Amino acid sequence: MLRSVAIKKHTLKVLFKKYSTSTVQTVSITDPNFQLPKNSTILSGIQPTGTFHLGNYFGAIKSWHDLNTIVKSSNSEDNNQLYFFVADLHSLTVPQDYEALRKQRIEAFASIIACGIDPQQSTVYYQSNIPEIASLQWVLSCFTSMGYLNRMTQWKSKANLKDNANVSDNNALGKVKLGLFGYPVLMASDVLALRATHVPVGQDQSQHLELTREVAESFNKTVQSPFFELPNTLLTPTKKILSLKNPEKKMSKSDKEPLSKIFITDTKDEIVKKFKKATTDSVDGKITFDPIGRPGISNLISILAAATNESLERVTKSVEDLSKQDLKLLVAEKVIQELDEPARKYYELINNSEYLDKLSKEGAEKARIVANKTLKDVMKLVGMGHY
């Protein structure tokens, strides 16, 4: 979830003329023309599945690092804010091993910092340490249509239901917990509590931002106040990293095949071994990028492009005359270089629990200042006098 940039609408029209002026903007932060307007707020989160693998790293965290770099190099008077969090409350929507979850939360937090997110520049926190978010969720749930939630797709996929499943079906009612059905409202609360108005997400999460806007509009109309600025969706290009052993599916920590995934903490020998064993194909001739016909080869090219910050076209051209084995070794070499610093930092952090605890508390304190003010103002608007 797994990620917002607060950008006023009139500013967007000036800076992103080449993009649609709708609420969905496709902007690459690696584009030399990309700029952050003053007073921008960037917010994104990731679920606590433990130490990051390449899918986490190239799919989201590297973009966070790039955003962190952009803001760090901008003028202090620009007043741009960065919020990155471990979405641990979201993890409760599906069955968990709670002792394992306790460990995975810490590993995910350490991974964020290790992958280049400066805790002095960015506010990094555990979602569960901001109680105002859960309180705001309750208020917003009172402005959210059951029909809209019923049309959402993720609760169906997580409950292993068909796309046309309906919450009124007995089968769906028996499988779906209230938290899973309503967790898009929690996502809306993540965004609105921190007053974020532009949220970078992958295509599969854009539906949740539509609901966030719907809820914000419903709230504003009901309380007759333009309190929430409607958040825009920022669809940022992400690298979809697939399993090394089964390139028909995404790389996943839950995959029981150890050779299917690369962790940021893997040793050089482990990385080389896993890439050598990666599934390719029996096609002869030049190396080509063909996700449908040659998913294994295409996955290796995608990983190489991500590790070298090159376009798929440029990378494909540069490796077309390599053998498959040489391609695997080249990808391993570049990934080792890319993960060298994150791995070193991760081990330093994971072995210093006091420092990690200090960072998480500092991040939560900063985030709570904003979230608490939002909640107080919301409570006043809905008639809660004690706020």
Image (cartoon, rainbow, N blue to C red):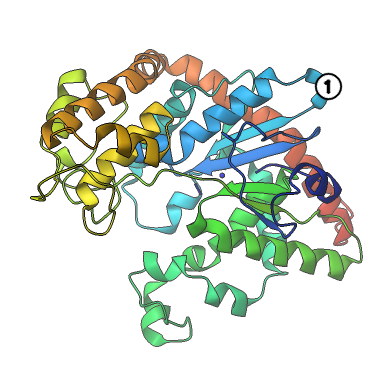
Tell me which corner region of the image, top left, top right, bottom left or bottom right, holds residue 27. top right
Expressed as whole percent of the image width and height from the top left, the position of residue 125 reads 57, 32
In the picture shown, does residue 240 fall above or below 23? above
Q: Callout 1: helix, strand or loop?
A: helix
Q: Is residue 214 left or right of residue 44?
A: right
Q: Is residue 13 left or right of residue 287?
A: right
Q: Nearer the viewer, residue 219 or 326?
A: 326
Query: Residue at the spot x=68%, y=34% of the render?
Result: 367
Expressed as whole percent of the image width and height from the top left, the position of residue 173 reads 42, 79
Expressed as whole percent of the image width and height from the top left, the position of residue 265 reads 29, 24
Tell me which corner region of the image, top left, top right, bottom left or bottom right, holds residue 302. top left
Q: Nearer the viewer, residue 342 or 178?
A: 342
Q: Is residue 216 visible?
A: yes
In the picture shown, does residue 241 fall above or below 150? above
In the picture shown, does residue 247 fall above or below 174? above
> How many numbered circles are shown?
1
> Badge 1: how crowded within 10 Å, few (<14), some, or many (20+)?
few
Query: Residue at the spot x=72%, y=37% of the render?
Result: 41
Which residue has dot 1 on it?
Answer: 77
Query: Residue at the spot x=78%, y=35% of the render?
Result: 37
Residue type at tag 1: Glu
